[in-house]
Amino acid sequence: MFRCRSTNQPVTPALAMMEIQIATSEDCRAIAELHVQVWQYAYRDILPEQYLASLSVTEREAMWRRVVEGQTAQLLVARIAGGVVGFVAFGTSRDEDASTDRAEIWAIYVNVTFWSMGVGRHLWLQAQQRILAEEYKSVSLWVLAENERALRFYERAGFVVEPQSRKSFELGGTTVEELRYSRGVG
């Protein structure tokens, strides 16, 4: 049985050497490239093709660099053979109605080549350990209502939808709905 070095959780042999580490400024380009690639693939049936094609790696890199340098959230990367194959960003909940003891998963993205192999699960488990260590009592996240793959992932991780949380907004000229999911930390 192989175990992930950072979480000690069972993994497939292909992921046995995966390491989860704190992101550095040097990781921001790889994070941005992965972020754009996953959006373009995962949201291809949800958001307009033109909008997805317009996503800028340079803009995402600047955004993630601000996160890393400003320490506005914790940002962890999953590496295999030195390459970034996934990341998770989390911190204090940004929701106006959130209690001070609620954390928020801001993003979890995994290279599509590594989907369903445990990378996202291990990123979540590492984030959960850190959230628990910071003494948060609960954690929430927002997910597009049409993103069925993400909904299944979060539900398997113990998150439940907050029924009254549904909100609509425009993204790329399309109205989308977002749901807030939450769970206890432990």
Image (tube, rainbow, N blue to C red):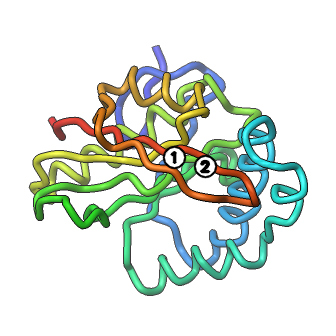
Which residue is label 1 attached to?
Answer: 19
Q: Element at badge 2?
A: strand
Give amino acid for label 2.
Answer: Arg
Placement of the C terminus among the 4 image quadrants: top left
Closer to the camera, 170 or 80? Answer: 170
Q: Quadrant of residue 71?
A: bottom left
For this orientation, the residue located farthest to the top is 1
Say whether marks 1 and 2 touch (CB < 8 Å). Answer: yes
Residue 34's spot in the image, x, y percent?
Answer: 72, 54
> What residue do we see at 46% from left, 13% from top?
1
Taking 164 as reference, is 149 above or below it? above
* Label at residue 82: none
Closer to the camera, 63 or 52? Answer: 52
Circle nearer the N terminus (1, 2): 1
Q: Residues within 10 Å of mark 1 (few under 14, many from 20)?
A: many
Give amino acid for label 1.
Answer: Glu
Q: How many marks?
A: 2
Taking 9 as reference, is 29 above or below it? below
Q: Element at badge 1?
A: strand
Q: How far is the residue under mark 1 from the one under mark 2? A: 5 Å
Q: Residues within 10 Å of mark 2 (few under 14, many from 20)?
A: some
> What residue do we see at 54% from left, 32% from top?
150
Residue 60's spot in the image, x, y percent?
Answer: 68, 72
> What residue do we see at 44% from left, 59% from top?
89
Taking 34 as reference, is 25 above or below it? below
Residue 12's spot in the image, x, y percent?
Answer: 57, 19
Q: In the visual, does 104 lie left or right of 24? A: left
Residue 40's spot in the image, x, y percent?
Answer: 80, 48
Q: Quadrant of residue 90?
A: bottom left
> What residue do we see at 18% from left, 55% from top?
102
Which residue is label 2 attached to?
Answer: 79
